[in-house]
Image (cartoon, rainbow, N blue to C red):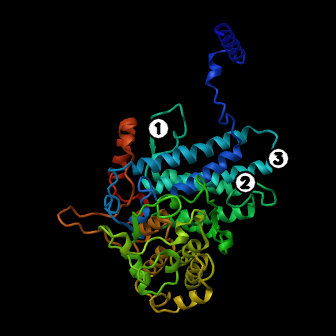
Amino acid sequence: MKKIIVSLLCSSLLVATSCVNGLDDYNVDQKNAINVPSETLFTGAVKNLTDALTSASVNSNNYRFYVQHWTSTQYLDEPRYNMTSRLIPQNMWQSLYRDVLMDLNEAKRLLMEDDLIQESIKNNQLAQLEIMEVYAWSVLLNTFGDVPYTQALDPENSLPVYDDAQTTYNAILGRLNDALSMITPEEEGYTGGDLLYAGDMEKWIKFGNSLKLKLAMVIADVDPAQAKTLVEAAAPHVFTSNADNATHPYLSAQPNNNPVSNSVTGPYSSREDYVAANTLVDVMNDLNDPRRVQYFTQVGGSYKGGVYGYPNSYSDFSTVSAKVADPTNEGLLLDYSEVSFLLAEALERGFAVGGNAESHYNNAITSSITYWGGTSAQASTYLAQPSVAYSSAAGDWKDVIGTQKWIALYNRGYDAWLEWRRLDAPNLQPPAVEGASALVIPQRLIYPINEQTLNGANRSSAAAAIGGDSSDTPLWWKGD
């Protein structure tokens, strides 16, 4: 019997070793793909970008706290703006560079090497890649300030310099214009892998121009001439209804579910960390806003927000609605409501975009209410209130547009934070913590901690260039 076993073992060993040519063959991963198509990388990058901006994880995305849409029940570091107790900046930085930009860059390389694809289709696909890359770069720039750009995405360079944010911003605006000029709308782009528009390049033209409108308005206070030129060129080609919205679908099963559902009570989590902030709920209660039922749960038949920046009992306050917590709730990258608010603002700044500020403002609010599940009649009733109507709401145009945009951008924390920093509206105040230094609502994320050790000299130079690596350092486009 022992001889038979030894013989079988020897035979097995011979079979196993006969399948390889050398020791390197043992390092081949038999389960994961070695070659990934360009379209697959594009799909993954768009999903990763949407996930990063949609996530409610306190380890990476705390924008909902900064704009006081949500507050916490017991963990107070995040709504009190502590960025070092967790790896918040590092996780966002890594998501955008590694999981989004690197994939888009590799997808572009593979696409350029494909000599068999029709030129017009290739150009359309390159345009899709460029538009999404510009979007991702804009998030980095508008989150951190100066970041690595010209030397980034090079695996051979582990110490990339940080580029001037304004120079980089102008560069990506130029890239966006170039991308739009490449599109042949009659031809397709990425199709099955395009989860936003299924290869409909007419939609991509609208999306790209709506993004151009948005990015141009960011610089309107510091470079009004360039902003005016870009806005007026984009305005005829932007979103015209909710049907144009850049929405990313999510599925009910992990890992393709809406990432919010990983952090709130529901099928994938039993956590009770978040409640609606009284800052937002009180304003919406005062305005009898019809979106409350879509945004929040009720407590005792009413909507009640927890005190922002202080401990709150989960059961005593409104929290996220079933719609927001639904694993299949779609992610929003850009929508018609946001575009309409931008057009209203453009007119107030004297830019020639057609229509009048009030009509665009009304369209923005109406499209937000109907997108969330309300009716046009509810929107009309809401707009008829003197405290909402464009001609009678309190404050100047920045206050009126800024407050309503802040409400409409609920559950889109990054975008709400960007607009709040630009318009200084509404008048948000940090929590006043007894016995502690005065808090300041963040104007930016600090640079990742690992940059101090891995790329210390370049990070230090960047920090000095922007006025200090502090969360209260305003970005270059803030103006006076």
Local SS, label 3: loop
Q: Nearer the viewer, mark 2 or mark 1?
A: 1
- Cα separation, mark 3 vs mark 2, equals 13 Å
Percent position of residue 306, x then y:
35, 73
Quick check: 5 left or right of 70?
right
Amino acid identity at mark 3: Gln
Amino acid identity at mark 1: Pro
Q: Compare residues 451 and 215 and report the one nearer the observer.
A: 451
Give the residue at x 74% y 56%.
183
- Determine if residue 8 is in view: yes
Quick check: 108 left or right of 223?
right
Local SS, label 2: loop
The answer to whether residue 273 is above or below residue 367 is above
Percent position of residue 235, x then y:
63, 71
Task: Give the image quarter of residue 436.
Answer: bottom left
* Contact? badges 1 and 3 (CB < 8 Å): no
Instruction: List the single residue furthest toward the top.
Output: 3
- Determine if residue 219 is in view: no
- Cα separation, mark 2 vs mark 1, equals 30 Å
Give the residue pinned by disc 3: 118
Give the residue pinned by disc 1: 160
Q: Nearer the viewer, mark 3 or mark 2?
A: 3
Dot 2, crowdedness within 10 Å: few (<14), some or many (≥20)?
A: some
Give the residue pinned by disc 2: 182
